[in-house]
Every structure is written in C-alpha cells, then in structure tokens.
Amino acid sequence: MNVVEKILGAHLVEGDPAKDSELGIRIDQTLTQDATGTMAYLQFESMGVSRVKNQLAVSYVDHNTVQIGYENADDHDFLASVARKYGIIYSKAGNGICHQLHLERFGKPGTTLLGSDSHTPTGGGIGQIAIGAGGIDIAVAMAGGAFHIPTPKVRAIRLKGRLRRGLSAKDVILKVLEKFGTKGNVGWIFEYTGPGVATLDVPSRATITNMGAELGVTTSIFPSDDVTRQFLTAQGRGKDFVRIEPDAGAKYDDEFTIDLGKLEPLAAAPHSPGNIETVASLKGMRVNQVMIGSCTNSSYRDIRTVAQIFKGRHVAEDVEVGIACGSRQVVNMLAADGSLAILIKAGCRILENACGFCIGAHMSPATNAVSLRTNNRNFEGRSGTKSAKVYLVSPETAAASALAGTVVASKGTTPVAAPKRFPVDDSMFLYRETAGKGVKGAAIVRGPNIAPVPKGVPLENGRKYVAAIKVGDKITTDHIMPAGARLKFRSNVPEYSKYVFEPCDAAFHDRCIANKDAGLANVIIAGESYGQGSSREHAALCPMYLGVKAVIAKSIERIHRANLINFGIIPLEFEDGADYDAIAEGDSLEFGDIRAAISGDGRVSVKCGKREIKAVARLSEREKRLVLCGGLLASL
C-alpha cells in the first residue's frame, strides 16, 4: 500500500475504494480561520450539538487582523466565545498563521485534518491527510459526521538527488505546477516519495504540500519518516510520531520523477501559479516590492535564510520589503539568534504574523508595480492592486532580488540546520483545558455584523431561468467573492453578497436581485476550471442568497463544486464545450423537469432560444439529495 491508501483505509466509514465510489472518511482534527470560521461556527451552532465530537478542533485568527472598524474585532469575540462554549482551542490574533501553527503544535502523522482554508494540505508535510473544504463541511466534521470525497487517484512524485544552493522547496512545487498546471487534477492526490524526500526538512515539505492546492488536487502528502520524527521531537511532541511510509512495491496510478539536482530557480508569472518561467528569463526586470512570508514560506528555515542573505547589506533604495513570519515561535527564534535585527537593519518592514499581504488585506503594491512574493497565489487583483504584476518566487530569489532591485537568482547561503529544539510557548492558545468538553452555559458574543445563516430552498420544477452572468476560464473564488477590504463582511451574508463578482461585473448583485424579485432563477455560465483557488464557501453561499440555482461550466474545481452542492446550487458541465458560445448573458433558459434529471443520471437538456444544450451534473446519491432539498443545512 502507498501512504494515501494506508491512512484513508484506517479512516474509511463509507464507500468502497475498489468500486471507485464516493468515500466517507472519519475526520480526526479540524481547523478554521477567522475569515471562514464565523460562518462555520454559525452553521455548527444551527445543528444543535452541545460540543465538538472530533478529536481536536482549533479556531485560528490570522486573516482579518487589521481591525479598521468594529467588524473584525466583533468576529474575534464571537469566535472566542464559541470556542469556549463548544470545546475548541482558540488561537488569538498575533499568535500566527493557522497552517504554520498547526504544523508546529497539533498536526499528527497518520491522522486526518479538515480545514476551512484551501491551504490546509500544508499538514501533508508531516504525513497527515489534510484537506481544505467549505465551512459547512468542517461543521459536519466537528459534529462527528464523515467527510466525502470521490475515490482518489494517487500520483507518485518521485524525488531524487539534492537541491543545489540557491534553490529551495518553492522551486520544486513550481516545477510540479509547470508539469501539471492548475486545472485537470481534480480527484488526484499527489504523494511524494523517492530518495530525494530524505533531503527535505519538514518546512520544505510543507511548502510543497501547501502549494499543491494550486494544482487543484484533493491533497498532497509526504511520508512520516526520521525527518518527521526529528521535527516533532524538536517541538516537544515526539509522542505524536508514527512512521508511515509506502510499502516496497506500492502501486500508483501515475508517476512523475524530478531530479532535484537539475532544477533551476523558477517563478510563477502573472496571473496564475501555473504560469511558470525561469528566473533567468526574467533577469534584470525592475522590482518595486518584495513580500516574504505567508503560510507558504514563513518558517524559521525560510526567514533565517533570508536574514543570512541580507546580513551586512541593505535592500535597494527603491524596493519596499515586508516580512511576515508564520508564528510567534518563528519570531522568538529570529530575535534570539540576531536575525530579526539583521532584517530591520537591512531596511525590511516587519509585519504581523498573519496572512496579510497574501490576501490583499494590506501591503498592496503601487499602480503597475512588479511585486515578488513568496506566497502561493498571484491571481489578478488578489494583492489589492489590479494593475500590479505579482510573481511567486522562493525566499532565496526574493531576497537576492530585493538587494539588487531587479530580478536575479540567489547564489545561495549556508543551509539552515533543522533546530534540535524549538522554543515552545502555547500561551496564546486559549481554552486548552476544556478542549473537547466545552463550558456548559457559556454565552455566545454576537456583534451587529454577525447575521443569521441563510438556508436554501428545495429545487422546483417549472421555474424560469436566466443567464445572469457569463465569465471565462480560470475564474477564481477571488473573482466571485473578493477578499481584501470586503473580507470583514463574511459574517453578514446579505451585506457580503453585494460584492459577488465585483471584480468582473459590479452590477451582478443588483441584476440578480431584480431577477429574483421577478421570479426568475439565476444561472452562472462559465468556462474551464471555474472556482479555482480558496475554500471560501461564500462563493457559493452568497450566490445562493442572490437566487443562483445552477452553474453551467466547461469544468468546475473540487472544493467549489462541493460548496455549490452544499448550498443547493446545481454544478452542471457542458457535454460539448462548444455550447458555451451559444449562451449569452441575459438569455432565457429552460430546464424542463429538472428534479427528475437530478434524481436520475444528472443529464439536463437546456433550451436557449431555438438551441438545445446538453449538460450533466455528475452526482453521488448523497449529493443528489442535497441538491434536491436545497443544500446541506436545509437537509438537517
């Protein structure tokens, strides 16, 4: 057996992998962050469960930490009160970024982790099946329910050799993205194996599994081996170690080999993590901003490496440099070894231990600026500046370019040794003593920005439909539900829904409301890889609130497809992609006996004028029930 088969087999509660069916797996751990957590806990609360039932639930505050106005602060109070009542550990703002913190303090090899953030697969760096999902799926898992995935295909990414100086794990995952792209990987899990694995420390492995989310795979995973043992022991968690490696002769559905010694520095060019170019091809391009950190490259290994490159030098005078560490532990270590002083003396801005610049919450580049960033996404406008050109690079390339003022590859520095002991300070993890138990009678704090959760309504025959918007390929959840300045409204669906598709068509909200008031059901028409990016369920929840009943696309990405189903929106795909051209925004559509179609094989004939278009919703029996009744909450 391979590593994936071993862990999934130990957690299987529904389905049969041999029959290629939908699988239900038991979830050991859950995590949320504040941008998605408020809705997840409102949904959990509506289920009437007295406490969390999974092994461990952690609520992190790391997204909405810039508190301009009362909304974010109110959300944090709500999250803390929910954690106390239901038996959840609460990580205060300033403690760090959820994925880095969970890797350090809670992740366990051989367990399952479900998180309301698409970069939850970071946990695969220590041999954990860690999957990103919508908040309502996390609520179900906290209530003791199974999480459902199609039986995955497993691709072995075989690593051999050793990285040369000046290269790091970021270049490895960019190479994988160069090969497999950001679409067409739905239903796959990537398992890293081969002799090269032993040359990568846990932070490097976590960088690779974190950015596996950009591939669109279910998750990515490394074995749990001696490197994992050393990391957990250094964190004071040696008892959590379990060795999990593939058996000799383990079978895979596909294999791809990377010779680490032959890699060269790479970059993801605007505006996709899959748009890979060599750093050499970009050499000499002027750089305006360099941002180092986020959940992808914010470990002690990463920031210490940057400090070594900066030592005794100063960043170029016309380059703005920001550093966001992943946790207080990382900051404390950098302060202790002198790295923090080096970064400050070099002219860096030291930012909060939070997601920050990655989600456009601050540090937006200037108009038309070139920004090199070590985070995981460079979607158009995600930085907060639509005209900016964001390139994703390794910490080594970022540091070297910050000094030069132009893009340049790093000559490398002395490798940072894995610490033998990390300084542990868990004082900003609250309610550890009541984790899993909760405090009976504890009050929930609700500010005015926290609104009730809307529920879907059953699917009806006889409705008139209209194509409310038509969008192209690779529409991300950032396009559908913008973050940045709009993120503070995530607890308030009626308010947040005003900004659905704002980057594409600011009139979408008003058009949908007018259609809804006229008794029309709204439909979204899309191209390839619709719903790329984050796990934000609001990209389905808010459209549902606006009366969207179906999406017809050339293809739909995994997490977003699941979110659509969870909120009663039909995820349809064109049988013939050419039919995408036959529908225009504003066209009237007829779906016929839609309930019978969904109850059957999911094939739907859509009439658009004189043309009949074939589309299909490939649904399991469980998913059919959810769509028919209006979504998961409506089914309870």
Image: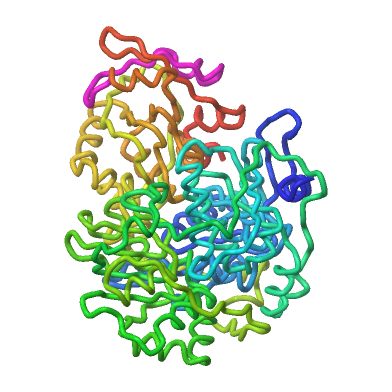
**Which is nearer the eye, 122 or 23?**
122
Residue positioned 55% across, 37% down in the render: 635
The x, y position of residue 236, in whole percent, is: 70, 80
Residue 543, relative to residue 419: is it above or below?
above
Residue 593, relative to residue 287: is it above or below?
above
The residue sitting at the top extreme is 610
Quarter of the C terminus within the rendering: top right
**Which is nearer the eye, 446 or 296?**
296
> Which image quarter: residue 552?
top left
The x, y position of residue 357, in whole percent, is: 34, 66
Residue 588, relative to residue 276: is it above or below?
above
Residue positioned 67% across, 55% down in the render: 112
How many numbered dots are placed on residues in this image?
A: 0
Name the image colouring.
rainbow
Residue positioned 50% across, 43% down in the render: 179
The magenta stretch spans residue 315 = no
The x, y position of residue 50, in whole percent, is: 62, 59
Q: Is residue 77 visible?
A: no
Q: Using residue 21 as the reference point, say whether residue 58 is left or right of it.
A: left
Q: Is residue 214 visible?
A: yes
The x, y position of residue 329, in whole percent, is: 54, 81
Residue positioned 41% across, 22% down in the render: 574
Quarter of the N terminus within the rendering: top right
The magenta stretch spans residue 594 = yes
Extent of the magenta region: 583-605
